[in-house]
Amino acid sequence: MCPDMPVAKPPILDALIIGAGFAGICMGKRLLDEGIDNFRIFDKAPKVGGTWYWNSYPGAACDVMSHFYCYSFEPNPDWSRKYSPWNEIQAYSERCVDNYGLRSHVDQSSAVERSEFDDDSGFWEVTFSDGSKQQARHVIDGSGGLHVPLIPEIEGADCFAGERWHSSQWRHEVDLAGKKIAVIGSAASAVQIVPEIARVAAQVNLFQRTANYIIPRHDRAYTALEKWCFRYLPLYNKLYRLFLFLRYDWLAYPIVKTSNMNFQRRYAMGQFRKLLRKSVPDSQLRDNLTPDYPIGCKRVLISDNFLASLTRENVSLVTAGIERIVPHGVRTVDGAEHEADVIVYATGFDTQGHHIDQRVVGPKGLTLSEAWSNAPIAYEGCMVAGFPNYHFVTGPNTGVGSTSVIFMIEQAANMIINSIRAAGSNGLIAPKNEAMQAYDREIQGALAHTVWATSCSSWYKRDDGHITILYPYNAQTFRRRHKKLRAEHFEISQRKR
Ligand code: NAP
C-alpha cells in the first residue's frame, strides 16, 4: 500500500465480541435472534472453540456431564459418553457456528490488544495485535478465564535439554513413547493427562504441591438405546437435562455453600475415601494423596483412573518441592534428581489477570485496571460502572465449581441482550456505581460463608484471600437474577452524535 494512501475505516459495528468459544458463540446466536447482524466475533485462535480448541492434551474431556455441558437451545443426542472428550466438544462448537450462520461473522487469528472508549463519538475502538482497528457500539468480552497459560518461573528451565510445554499448548508432534516425563501440577488437567501418557511413557513423575480431593466420575459410553431416546424423544432429553441441572444444584452446590459437614459434604468425603482405598493399596501413598483442607475449598476433581494410575510401576508421585530444573530433569529440595526428556506444565491459567491483559480504557482515560485496583467488580458479573456498553459474559465472580459454565453463559447472555435492548441504537448503558458496590458487598459477604474462604490457596482467589472468580449462590439464583434488567440499577445516556 502507498504510504500516504488513506486507510478506509471499517463501518461501525453494533457489537464486537471477543472470543469464539462457548460464550462468543452464544452471544452471536442471541444477537442474531434479536435481529442484530451487524457484529463480528474476533478470536486469537485459528479455530473456534475457545478453551476446547487449546486444551487438546491426551485425555482431555469435560468434567461436567455432556448433556448439561451444551446449550439448552442446542441439545446434542450424539454425545458418545457421559463425559465427552474434547474433540466432540470442539466439533459441537464448530457445528453451532455453522448451524447459526455465524461462520461469516468470525475473524480467526485476531487477537484483541486494547479496547478504548472514544469520548467524542461514544463508540469503543478496538485495536488488534496487527495494529488494525474496529469501532463498535458495544463490546462483549466472551474471552473466559482459562486461556492465558500460567507457567511458573522455575530456575534452570531455560537450560532444560528436552522439550517442555504447557498442558494447553500440547505438542502432539512429539512422540512420548519410551520417554521420561515430568508433569508439574496435579489438578484438573494433570489428572486427565497422567493416566493417558503413562500408557506409553517409560516413566512419569508427577510433581504434586498440594493434594486434591478426587471422587469417581463413573464415566461410560451411552448405549444405542439411550442415544435413540436422546434423538427421538425430546421430552426424555429435556427431563434428563433437568435431572442433571438439579443434581448439580442439589448435590454439588451444597458442598461449597458451607464448610459445615452437611449430608452432601459427608457423601463426597465418603466417595473420596472409598476411591482412594480401592485404587491405592500403599498407605504412605494414600497419605500423600490426602488433602489437609476442607473438601470443596479447591475444585473437587473427578476421575475413575487417575489414582490407580499412580500405582503403575512407571509412575511416581513426587511430593518434595521443586528446587530447580536441571538440563536432564527436575531437582527437588531433598536433593533428588528426577530425569526427564519432557516437562509438561499442568500449572493452570492466569485467571486473575486475563481481563486486564486486554487493556480496557473507558471514558476520560480511566483504565479497567485502575477501576479494579482494589478488586475486580462487575454488576451481576456483567458490567462495570463507568464503562458504558462494555459487557462481560463470564466476568468477575461468575465462576462456578458446581454447575455447567454453559448454563451460566446463557443466563449472562440474557442480561447482556437486555442491556443492549435498553440502550437502544444510540444509548450508552452502565450500572450505577452504588448498585455495583452494593452487589459486590452482598457477593463478598456470601462468599465469606462458603468453603472457598477456608484454608487453602486456589485460582479462585488472590493471595490476600479475596475471592474474585466464584459466584456464591446456586445456578437457579444466577438464572433468576439475570432474567430481567433492574432498570433502577442502570443509567442510560445518549451519544452526543
Ligand atoms: P489448576 O487447577 O490451576 O492447577 C494447577 C496445578 O499446578 C495445581 O496442582 C498447582 O498446585 C500446581 N502448580 C502451580 N504452580 C506450581 C509450581 N510453581 N510448582 C508446583 N506446582 C504448581 O490448573 P488446571 O489443572 O489446568 O485446571 C484449571 C481449571 O481448568 C480447572 O479448575 C477447571 O476449571 C478447568 N479444567 C477443566 C477440565 C475439564 O472440564 N475436563 C479439565 C482441565 C481443566 P497447588 O494446588 O499447590 O497450587
Image (spheres, rainbow, N blue to C red):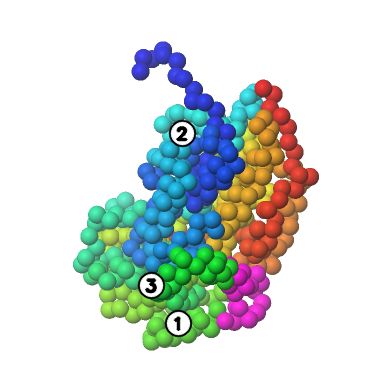
* Label 1 to label 2: alpha-carbon separation: 48 Å
Q: Position of residue 331 (x, y in %)?
A: 33, 65
Ligand 1 neighbours mark 2 (CB distance < 8 Å): no
Type of residue at label 1?
Answer: Leu
What secondary structure is marked by label 3? helix
Compared with 51, 208 (above or below) is below
* Label 3 to label 1: alpha-carbon separation: 29 Å
Residue at image point 53% right, 83% down: 270
What number is the disc on residue 224?
Answer: 3
Residue at image point 65% right, 69% down: 257
On the rendered structure, is 124 left or right of 229?
Answer: right
Q: Quadrant of the N terminus?
A: top left
What secondary structure is marked by label 1? helix
What number is the disc on residue 364?
Answer: none
Residue 261 among magenta residues: yes
- Dots 2 and 3: beta carbons under 8 Å? no
Report the magenta residues as a range: 245-267
Type of residue at label 2?
Answer: Phe
Residue at image point 59% right, 82% down: 266
Residue density around tag 3, few if under 14, some if 14–19, many if 20 or more, within 10 Å: few
- For marks 3 and 1, the one nearer the N-term is 3
Say which residue label 1 marks. 275
Residue 256 among magenta residues: yes
What number is the disc on residue 128?
Answer: 2
- For marks 2 and 3, the one nearer the N-term is 2
